[in-house]
């Protein structure tokens, strides 16, 4: 009798587990559209206008890394920034050889431009976080390399400013 009870119990358990093994399988399909929001950055002339920095005449002997700081005038328009105010910005350009990581090469030998975000150095090619509600003040300061003279000529420099959501 005990054998029949154990056999019956075994068969019942086998039936229970075999039903679990053949349970229905359903596939769940999820469709998502990812939209990349963009930020437009442009000069004071309005959309599609380049950012231009006009510096006053520089007196070579007075270039000391502090004088002649000039603000970079820019406008920033991020369509969805109210919902996601965390942004990041960076400058891409050619770093002046033998100088700090924030010194942009210019067309004049031994003369560079220090890139600043507020009072902080802005490393070329590195993302710097900020909040959309407080557009950071960007500026440049002329820097002499100290390894040679600076010629009396017109200076130009070029960099790309990028802004993205974090």
Image (cartoon, rainbow, N blue to C red):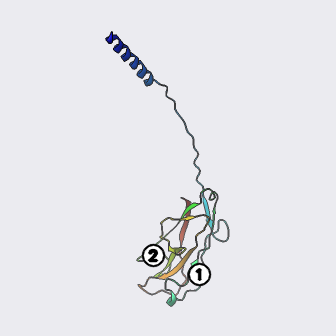
Is 99 in front, or is 28? Answer: 28
* Element under disc 1: loop
Q: CA distance from mark 1 to mark 2?
A: 19 Å
Q: Give the x, y percent position of residue 51.
A: 61, 71
Residue visible at 59% across and 60% down? 85
User: Furthest residue to the top?
Assistant: 1
Horizontal relation, residue 97 to residue 115: left or right? left
Q: How many marks?
A: 2
The N terminus sits in image quarter: top left
Label annotation for residue 55: 1
Q: Is residue 126 above or below residue 119?
A: above
* Element under disc 2: loop
Q: Give the x, y percent position of residue 46.
A: 67, 68
Residue neighbourhood size for the residue with mark 1, other residues' Cα within 10 Å, grouped as few (<14), some (14–19), many (≥20): some
Q: Is residue 4 above or below residue 60?
A: above
Q: Earlier in the sequence, mark 1 or mark 2?
A: 1
Q: Is residue 83 above or below residue 126?
A: above
Is 130 in front, or is 151? Answer: 130
User: Furthest residue to the bottom?
Assistant: 61
Q: Is residue 151 above or below residue 71?
A: below
In which image quadrant can residue 160 be found?
bottom right
Is 32 in front, or is 17? Answer: 17
In which image quadrant can residue 147 be found?
bottom left
Q: Give the x, y percent position of residue 67.
A: 53, 85
Horizontal relation, residue 20 to residue 4: left or right? right
Task: Answer whether labels 1 and 2 touch (C-beta < 8 Å).
Answer: no
What residue is disc 2 on? 96
Residue neighbourhood size for the residue with mark 2, other residues' Cα within 10 Å, grouped as few (<14), some (14–19), many (≥20): many
């Amino acid at each position: 009798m005990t054998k029949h009870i154990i056999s019956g119990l075994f068969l019942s358990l086998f039936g229970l587990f075999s039903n679990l093994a053949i349970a229905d399988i359903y596939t769940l399909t999820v469709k998502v559209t990812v939209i990349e929001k963009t930020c437009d950055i442009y000069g004071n002339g309005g959309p599609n206008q380049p950012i231009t920095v006009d510096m006053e005449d520089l007196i070579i002997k007075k270039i000391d890394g502090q004088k002649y700081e000039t603000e970079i005038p820019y406008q920033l328009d991020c369509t969805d920034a109210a919902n996601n105010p965390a942004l990041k910005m960076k400058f891409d350009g050619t770093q002046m050889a033998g100088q700090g990581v924030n010194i942009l090469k210019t067309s004049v030998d031994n003369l560079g431009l220090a890139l600043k975000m507020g009072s902080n150095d802005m490393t070329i090619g590195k993302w710097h976080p900020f909040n959309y509600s407080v557009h950071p003040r960007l500026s440049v300061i002329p820097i002499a390399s100290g390894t040679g003279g600076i010629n009396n000529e017109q200076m130009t420099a070029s960099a790309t400013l990028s802004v993205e959501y974090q």
